[in-house]
Image: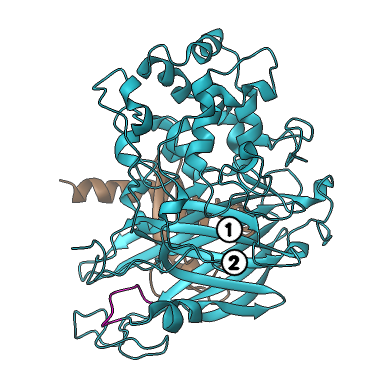
Chain colours: A brown, B cyan
Amino acid sequence: MTVSRRTFLSRSTVGLATAGALAAVPSLATLAKLSVDPEAAPLEGDQLVAHVRSVSSGDITLLVGTTEVVYRDKAIAQRLARAAARAGR
Amino acid sequence: MSSHREAPAISKDPVADNTDLYAFVSTDDPDGKTVTLIANYIPLEGPAGGPNFYEFGDDVLYEIHVDNDGDAKADITYQFAFTTQVLNPDTFLYNTGQIADLNDQHWNRPQFYSVTQVKGGGVSTVLGDKLACPPCNIGPRSTPDYEARLGSKAVHDLGGSVKVFAGQRGEGFYVDLGSIFDLLALRPFQSLHRFHPPESTSGVNATKDLNVNCIAIQVPKTALTRDGSAAVDPADPRAVIGVWATASRQKALIREKDGKLHNSGPFVQVSRLGNPLVNEVVIPMGTKDLWNAQDPDADSQFLKYVQHPEVAGLLPFLYPGVFPNLAAFDSSGKPRADLVAILMTGIPAGVVPTFPGNFTGTTIADMLRLNMAIKPNNASRLGVVGGDNSGFPNGRRVSDDVVTIELRAIAGFTIPLVDNTYTPDPPAAVIEDGTNNSAIPVYLDRFPYLGTPSSGYDKPAA
């Protein structure tokens, strides 16, 4: 699948708008539900990459296929940070 | 080098490393109606580099971009995406027998590619799919009669006067790397060097007999101009295009324990090339990786490095007493408007008396600019400075001596084009690294112009 920069940018715009709409979604459970929602964009395979860009702001970049979505959720970011801290002990 | 291993990050990722970019009116097209764009990748391929011989990255997005309205944004992009097959995973061999043609089942890792044209606004058109690359040139037992059976057969006619080729070719760029990177020594003039001045000698072409992976596409001029015009009038701004090439990788890479790789996310640019040697010797070390990740329309942030090139300051120091006028100019702090025109805006009409120009406007951007209305000839490997307007910096042909051209420009030879009070130091008109294209026997007089790759059996020679 080839994706042009312009196509990607247009997708990113959609993604950012989506992230804005999702910013009010508070819980990991809700995010998990969104991930398997048949109405959502299908995943390529059974995995995605989430990059917590900032625990304090809750910015999480989700990388799926050849797209990315910036998602903001402080609660999830902090739970992941606590899990990471536990793993690091 | 032109752009081989030119930045710290990309030097560790050769499959994605742009090495050279060429753009010229097709020299074998009697009507002059097509332009050839060539983007090379994977630097310094030793022909004997098996058993995993060189191939394009299936996980790399290779692109050639064309700006046709002077804003340094891509109006047309040609994307190349590769897929490699492994016919027999139970052998270590690249080829399990003689590769007699592109469909030969003895070639264990055939590679195929798609070509997609993306026009401004994001409209994509697949121009070709499942196009075969040639194998690498292994030797007379594995790849006999290479050019006739494999190389030439990998030129694909896509219709509409569009041709493509992707695969290994002989390196066409020539340069005395070993000398230049030894404190800018130029062997023909090294007796004048500040350090260790031996007798002057001729240059040594460090890329001789090496190979490169080449992506070439030939398209009608009418496909490149902003309005489909034919680009026949050199004074018509619509005849001028700006070209650059890139490689991009997906943002995230996960390495699995079983050796598998998982790529995710949008493609992020990791390599870029417009004019030769810009990121190589103009952009400083701490900025090179940033430069590779940027688009040309953001190049104003790098303008100061072109206006005050480091090499112009080094030449008077390393060659004491040889470049006094250049030293005085450099000390004055005046910006090098000549280099800005050559590399970042194109040369306006009237600056070089016999050259109609290739100016694309005031947008500062490193693009290889080609006035497509100038008919091809092969009068001088020194291009415009040699009186041949169909060569660099009006585009770039595979045989152009870009090292000498840029050396002379940086040494001050082109300052009088924009400052008639300046007198170049006499050596600025003659300096060179001592290599030339007559030592390259591998150019073709037809598409894709870069010649048969050296075979691993034959090179290096016994």
Q: Where is mark 2, residue-wise?
A: B217
In the image, B259 versus B373, the foreground residue is: B373
Element on which disc 1 rests: strand
Front disc: 2 or 1: 2
Question: What is the x, y in percent for residue B442?
Answer: 44, 63
Where on the picture, by quarter, is residue B334? top right
Where on the picture, by quarter, is residue B229? bottom right
Give the amino acid type for the residue marked by disc 1 in the picture: Ile
Q: Is residue A85 left or right of residue B284?
A: left
Element on which disc 2 rests: strand
Give the amino acid type for the residue marked by disc 2 in the picture: Ile
- Give the vertical position of B316 relative to B241 (above or below): above
Which range of residues does the magenta coloring cover?
B135-142
Q: Is residue B239 left or right of residue B458?
A: right
- Give the vertical position of B308 relative to B257 (above or below): above
Mark seen at residue B229: none
Instruction: Tell me, yes or no, whether the highlighted magenta stretch contains residue B410.
Output: no
The quadrant the C terminus of chain B occupies is bottom left
In the image, B437 versus B41, the foreground residue is: B437
Question: What is the x, y in percent for residue B180?
Answer: 35, 34
Give the crowd class for mark 1: few <14, some 14-19, many >=20 residues within 10 Å: many
- Give the vertical position of A69 relative to B311 (above or below): below
Q: Where is mark 1, residue-wise?
A: B64
Question: How many numbered tags mark residues here?
Answer: 2
Q: Is residue B102 left or right of residue A24?
A: left
In the image, B415 versus B112, the foreground residue is: B415
Question: What is the x, y in percent for residue B184?
Answer: 36, 29
The quadrant the N terminus of chain B occupies is top left
Q: Is residue B72 visible?
A: yes
